[in-house]
Amino acid sequence: MNPLLQYPALAAALMLSLLGSPSQAQTTAAAPAAPAPAGPAPVLGSPNPAAAIHAARFHGATARKAHYRAIYQLNSNDPKVIAKTLQALQAALADPRLKGKLALELVVFSGGTAAFRKNQPYEADVLALQQAGVILAQCENSMKAQSLTKDDMLPYISYVPTANGELIIRQAEGWSLVHL
């Protein structure tokens, strides 16, 4: 919450210090707004004991279903986004709650196509995902737009006519969509 709203007296004092007395405020020409001075940090109370106990006992959601499905969307050629997406897939595969219950797909399009091209720094990570059973789907529309052929791509990936179509179908089938 905004400290000025939380402490009305502080807000009034601040306004008076900026504008002067109420009569001066009416006669003073409008000046450019100055940044508000940093005031004292609001005093926080003690944590809610019941919430703290609950937080200490919480260890994440329980995977009660027999099967989970998620499709990850990668449409950026930013190396940090690509690396983060590949790491997120590995993290999902490593989650002990999901062991033996998880189907994953990575659909790549637009700039994300770089992740599935040969001779890129992502080959080892992509191969590890393929070996773990992740479906690796490349958008053919994006390949056409970038004048790429299957010879330019990693040999163990799959192809879909459009990434958008793949995302629409998978979501309609109940797959969770993950986009980092």
Image (spheres, rainbow, N blue to C red):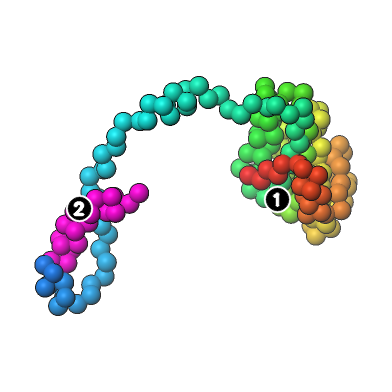
Q: Which element carries disc 1, helix, strand or loop? A: loop
Snapshot quadrant of residue 70: top right
The picture places residue 81, in percent across and down from the top left corner, at 63, 44
Q: Are marks 2 and 1 in contact (CB under 8 Å)?
A: no
- Can see residue 105? yes
Amino acid at circle 1: Asn
What whole-number distance in Å separates the C-alpha atoms at marks 2 and 1?
Answer: 48 Å
The image shows residue 65, relative to residue 27, as above or below, that is: above
Residue at horizontal 69 percent and vertical 34 percent from the top:
89
Residue beneath disc 2: 10
Total marks shown come to 2
Tell me which label, 2 or 1, sits earlier in the chain: 2
Residue at horizontal 73 percent and vertical 29 percent from the top:
65
The image shows residue 67, relative to residue 118, as above or below, that is: above
The image shows residue 70, relative to residue 23, as above or below, that is: above
Residue at horizontal 86 percent and vertical 37 percent from the top:
156
Amino acid at circle 2: Leu
The picture places residue 62, in percent across and down from the top left corner, at 64, 26
Snapshot quadrant of residue 34: bottom left
Q: Which element carries disc 2, helix, strand or loop? A: helix
The picture places residue 142, in percent across and down from the top left corner, at 79, 55
- Can see residue 114? no
Residue extent of the magenta highlight: 1-20
Residue beneath disc 1: 75
